[in-house]
Image: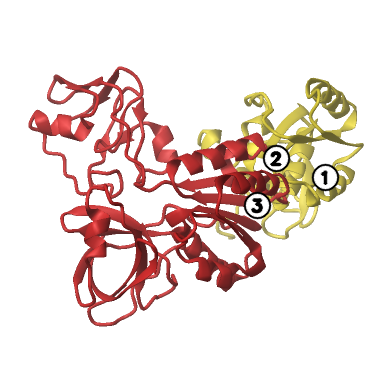
Chain colours: A yellow, B red
Amino acid sequence: MPRLEHTSVPLWAVPEGAAPAAPDATGTSYLLVGVGAEGERQVTTWADALDGAPVTVVLAEDQAAAGVRLATALASARVGVRIRVAGPVGDCLALRGVAVRAGVEDDELHLAPTSGGPVAVQCCHCGATTPSEKGIDDVVSCTGCDRRLLVYYHVSRRTGTFLGFQIDAEEAVS
Amino acid sequence: MTGTQIELVVAAVEESAHAVRTVRLVAPDGAPLPSFVPGSHLVVDCGGRSNAYSLVGESIAPAEYAISVLLVEDGSGGSAWVHGLAAGDRVSALRPRSAFAPIASATRHLLVAGGIGVTPVVSHLRAARHWGRDVQVLYVFREGHGAHVDDVKELAGDAAEFFGDRVGFTERLRTVLAEQPLGTHVYVCGPGAMIDDVLEAATEAGWPASRVHSERFGLDALDPGEPFRVTLTETGTDVEVPSGTSLLEALEGVGLDVPNLCRQGVCGECRIPVSAGTPLHRDLYLTDEEKQACDAIMPCVSRADGPTLEVPL
């Protein structure tokens, strides 16, 4: 496996990866997104430190609800905003996808995973997405087509899913 | 040679604004010229010295390359040479090069022009019309010195605003920067001081670096810079580079033959590697990524950010 910084996998998205750098505080407004109880705690910490600047807070129990509300908030956002997301790592990846699709640039977006947990693996054969606790180079069973998928060191910026492909795809069928 | 040399013929010259001439260049056989990315410039051989001029015409298989050149009275002669051109004259240039392109992922483009810095903006606007892009233009110029005002009006319509004074422009700029929807990128071209003001206003309005794009052309003379010492690791010598002497001149002074062409940070010909020390980049050739890598320098204009620099020559 190559060094992860040369791949599309963010270092904060893997176990033993680097902790994210301190969030950028040069914005004129902030959009803080927390998923789950730990995400909410992180958002509260951020909001307290951002004394003075306009802050919009989105708190949700799950990534799907957070994604809908994040997309709504971004649709009316103005340049100058900074977005920070705290939640389980798979949710951070998915919500990064929501932000990227809305036109958020990397230097406007801060992601702070509060825990590990499942990431989504997308099957390149049938397109189904399988939640998995496993990581890169592990094998998961696709919920769509039952193929044994190798979790590859590639993450989609748009969907936040890891690429999975059939582990023995290149072996000849006898 | 960094780019491919092309030979062109002057088809027409017109006085397009006070002290500004638009020169239309065509291929000698009249064939379409190579397409270019909007915002590109042409490095023109101005009788022995190379100057870069933004292309103001259509960019897809164009019949002509049009440049608009402001006569710089106390300049080093490049613009005066262009102003001396007449129909039928031969001009040699390098193929267009892109250093100020529209960002493909942007959903809206805020174009800010000062004086003759409007030239790449005109190119952006032609592409924006072609592709139906959302644009807004702020153009500030001295009364009577506005080049391409009619083009901007025609291409941008109500989305263009014109300013004759710095104060009104700055005030409006601050308002406009604060109200851009997410997805907007800002592009600024003009005199150095004006670019600095716009960059500062953008930073104050919370714009991240990724959304801000600027192009500086040789309208301002570079300052003489601080003295520094360069260590040549291959030859094993140290060379002092005094204030007011370029690194290129210093290297030539000790007998090193560094290929060069424009001697003003535009053409890319004199690029040399850097093995230690931090370069103070002042060129228009290296990309932002290349500049941050600190492993190459254009010695004709760039210097050391610190007392020493080491190059493997």
Q: Chain of mark 3?
A: B
**Which element type, helix, strand or loop, lies under badge 3?**
strand
Amino acid on which the number 3 mark rests in the picture: Thr
In the figure, B177 relative to A110: above or below? Answer: below
Q: Residue at x 76, y 53 (%)?
A: A146
In the figure, B41 relative to B231: above or below? Answer: below
Q: Name the side, left or right, on which A49 lies relative to B44.
A: right
Q: CA distance from mark 2 to mark 1?
A: 16 Å
Q: Quadrant of residue B91?
A: bottom left
Q: Nearer the viewer, residue B265 or A119?
A: B265
Q: Residue A122: which disc?
A: none
**Is circle 2 on the same chain as circle 3?**
no
CB atoms of marks 3 and 1 within 8 Å = no
**Which element type, helix, strand or loop, lies under badge 1?**
helix
Q: Residues within 10 Å of mark 2 (few under 14, many from 20)?
A: many
**Residue at image mark 3:** B184
CB atoms of marks 2 and 3 within 8 Å = no
Q: Residue at x 66, y 58 (%)?
A: B107
**Which element type, helix, strand or loop, lies under badge 2?**
loop
| Mark with earlier residue (2, 1) | 1
Q: CA distance from mark 2 to mark 3?
A: 11 Å
Q: Residue at x 83, y 46 (%)?
A: A73
In the figure, B105 relative to B283: above or below? Answer: below
**Residue at image mark 1:** A70
Q: Residue A80: which disc?
A: 2
Q: Quadrant of residue B293?
A: top left
